[in-house]
Image (tube, rainbow, N blue to C red):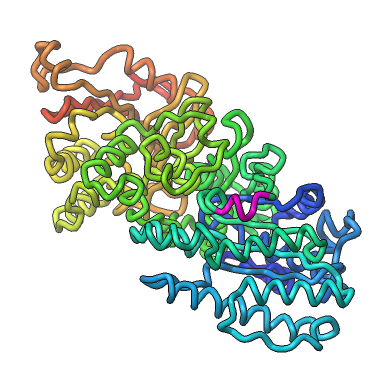
Amino acid sequence: MDRRIPYGIINYAEIIEKKGYFVDKTHFINKLENIQNPVFLRPRRFGKSLFCSMLQHYYDLRNKENFEELFGHTWIGQHPTGDQNKYIVLLFDFSEVQVEDGLTGTERNFTEYCNNLLNNMRLLYPEYLGGFPPLHVHTPVATNLNNWLTYLWMSGAPPVYIIIDEYDNFVNQLITTYQDRLYQEITTGDSFLRSVYKVLKAGRRSGSVKNIFITGVLSITIDDLSSAYNISTFLTLDPTFESMLGFTQSEVDTLMDTLYHDYNLDPSVRLQVDEVVKNMYNGYHFVSPHTAAVYNPTMLMFFLRQFCEQKTIPDDLFDLNLRTDLSWIRRLTGGSNENTKELVSQLTTRETISINRKSLVSQFNVSEFFEPVFYPVSLFYLGILTRKDEFELSFPNLSMKEIAVEYFNEIFRIDLGQEKYKEMMQGFVENPDLFKLFSDYWQLYVSQLPESVFAQMNENFYRTTFYELCSRYLSPWFTWNVERSYPSGKSDLEFVGKYHERFSSLRWVIEFKYFSNIELARLKTPIEEFEVQEEDTRQIRGYAEGLIQEYPEAKIRLFVIYCFGNQGFRVFELTRNSPGKFS
């Protein structure tokens, strides 16, 4: 196979040269040309750097002879705007700037990075900058940048198209490491950073700068710099640009069609594979909960690279590089362990957080960043939560649910390294018994939970933590569905045997029901005498009807699990009397 799945490639030209699979987003270039100084934010590893590289190659006058090779197969190549290859392009990547403990060291690193970049431009554009003297690397960036832009403007050189990737990266490091004073010094007054943005603003006014495209994760820095740079257009929540980064379902379907053809993949397994990628990587609603969701492109490419090479569903479905460090959550909650526990517990038990829609629309500064009302906003921009409806945020997919449970286990110091877990899962693989598996989970995991957790307990918690624990050990053989949609509703949890493994035809549907300790007392029925409820069997039978139609050859089993506070549980299996009939 000559073509490559471009996981980890952030250089647009490299993808083209190596014949990488490419989801064409170039039509957004045309839309962006109508926007002055756009700022577009997305979570980490959402394709921002690749998009910046695409803009760079489109506008860079050095690529004029290569335009057809780089863009001829794309939408913009067939509908060029007229501005292609007309500008000097200056691309800053602020993730390259190392943060130090003090202002002096951080400013030095920023200064050296930017000035070295400006000096390198003399070599890249000798016809316009050959006569410009070398810059001293220790001179303030604002001074050098202003002189550099002025020289170009006065010499009649083409304007400069400026791209700033990861604009907030090194500033975010200050936030998570509690260096609030240093953050204030950098983003207020006549700091080295604000001075640079003032020069950029002046460059736009003079015409030496054609446009400025900025991308990053959080909007707090832009707000704190607003008096120095109040010319930006905030596109993050603009519906026109919602899918500029992130793949739509139709784009994923087209990509999958191509991969199945090129890699000669078995089309009979397509339904299960599509189900996995949708559960794990789709679900992001950045603008409206009513429009189509988008996939995280980096997460999807992580999966596809392994899947196409091995022609099997990989054991590891989640790229650990995408895990937002727990330090973010701790910092959000002011470093208070109790506040952190409260937030993480809410995420794990309720799986939703209320949101004031207006707070998403507006930018916010660092002082608001640590206010409880803005916790959900920060989690939204970090990609942990997404729009569920007009009033709540929820997890976009199973990958983010897993991360939330990992946070929970870390915060409450749940021991997951016991040898007994290995014995528990090994025993299940040898003899897949859900009764035994859930009993072991209750004994080994639930027994560790502190009493305070049970005040917030519900069926979501048991379902999600049970799923996350199983996924740690059983992913070589299974994938899982959580809240899979059927005509009659959404199932709680499903075990799905991988098509290429020993449990390939297995599909277990599990419905969780929860009774608090108080509700259990009101029942006046001992747990061991509790019987499965008729309404619950009707509910899960409805799911089975839809599942049988999709997978008529599957070995379907139905279970209802009742959890009673922290007192105990019952597991019931519905028996199959005839094809399609359960009781």
Q: Is residue 226 magenta?
A: yes
* Residue 289: image location, x then y, percent: 57, 31
Please identify the quadrant where the C terminus is shown.
top left
The quadrant in which residue 72 appears is: bottom right
Q: Position of residue 170 (x, y in %)?
A: 48, 64
Residue closest to the eye, 249 or 380: 380
Residue 101, given in percent of the width and then of the height, sits at 36, 71
Q: Is residue 39 left or right of residue 534?
A: right
In the picture, measured across the screen, residue 318 lies left or right of residue 76, that is left
Relative to the observer, which residue lies in front, 203 or 386? Answer: 203
Question: Compared with residue 59, is residue 80 higher up or lower down, i.e. above or below?
Answer: above
Seen in the picture, residue 131 relative to 189 is either above or below; the reply is: below
Query: Residue sitting at 33 percent across and 58 percent down?
Result: 178
| Quarter of the rendering occupied by the N terminus | bottom right
Write down the region rendered in magenta.
225-230
* Nearest the eye: 118 or 13: 118
| Residue at image location 11% in from the left, 21% down from the top | 527
Residue 20 rendering spot, x and y as whole percentages: 68, 66
- Chief secondary structure of the magenta span? loop
- The structure residue drawn at horizontal position 14% and vertical position 54%, both measured from the top left corner, is 420
